[in-house]
Image (cartoon, grey):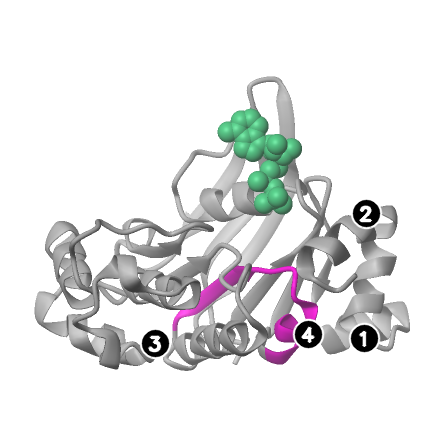
Amino acid sequence: MTDTLPILEATDIDHDYGTISVLENVSATLRRGAVTALIGPNGSGKTTLIRSLAGLHEPTAGKIAYHGPETARRIGYLPQHPAFRPGFTCLETLEFYASLVGGDETAAMTHLDRVGLADAADRPVEALSGGMTRLLGIAQATIGDPPVVVLDEPGSGLDPGMSMHVFDVAAELADDGIAVLLSSHDLELVERVADRVLILSDGRIVRRGSTAQLRDELDADSLWAVYETAIGGDLDTVRVQGGHA
Ligand code: ADP
């Protein structure tokens, strides 16, 4: 479902950290019901772009348009390393967060159930595995029913079964009508869930489209081959980090 109206449109974004230019002329469109995957080597600017689209920092130049009521204030965000207040259970964590952001505290259990954590509702957050911590982070990102959810490397550091579950949860959020943006180094999982792929290299989007379109354009037999062609020499960094060495 990628033919819906855009909920977020970024046009020609630049981002500088001091004198260092990290993003240049980046444009991206997110639509409800679609998973957009952002892939690129380490240091290519994925986290910077994700934080820009989530409204966590202002672009140095360019424009981000958010459509729909209060969309800019209602974007769900999963950081790369989510952390939670020790001593709280999973359920208390979500109830507390809902009370902070004006969400529905009574819906906390529904949000846990949505990510498959209902059975861990009473577990203290410090007793969660890495995968469960990510899932709790995704549940937290959906508090307040945001129209857009951005997930920074939701599968990194997880075993294959857990990363697949996390990606499937992301796909289910899109099935529920949310615009989902996620970054990843796992191109097999990206291929499994993403409606559209953005390939970032050195701060610029060098390719965009569905996996099928990108394969056709580059006459490639897999997303890995597309990626290799698109980013050239940076591939080794990604293979090692993504566990595909
Ligand atoms: P990725 O997520 O693709 O690894 P990042 O957006 O984290 O890329 O980083 C892109 C570049 O910006 C890297 O060279 C990184 O060192 C630099 N960078 C990231 N955050 C900061 C910061 N707060 N200050 C200065 N440089 C930064």
- Which amino acid does the dot numbered 3 rest on? Val
Q: Is residue 118 left or right of residue 43?
A: left
Q: Which mark is residue 222?
A: 1
72 lies above or below 2: above
Classify 10 Å Cα crowding around label 2: few (below 14), some (14-19), many (20 and above): some
Residue 166 visible here: yes
Ligand 1 - quadrant of the structure image: top right
Task: State whether residue 15 appears in this view.
Answer: no
Q: What is the C-alpha distance between the residues marked 1 and 3? A: 29 Å
Badge 4: how crowded within 10 Å, few (<14), some, or many (20+)?
Answer: few
Point out residue 35 in the picture as x, y percentages from the top left corner. 52, 71
**Is residue 188 placed above or below 76 in the rendered structure?**
below
**Label 1, label 4: how far apart the Cα atoms are:** 9 Å
Q: Label 4, label 3: how many angstroms apart (C-alpha)? A: 21 Å
- Tag 1: residue type? Ser
Q: Secondary structure at mark 1?
A: loop
The residue that mark 4 highlights is: 188
Does mark 4's beta carbon lie closer than 8 Å to ligand 1?
no
Q: Write down the region rendered in magenta.
A: 178-192
Residue 93 on image: x %, y %: 18, 59
Cα separation, mark 2 vs mark 1, equals 17 Å
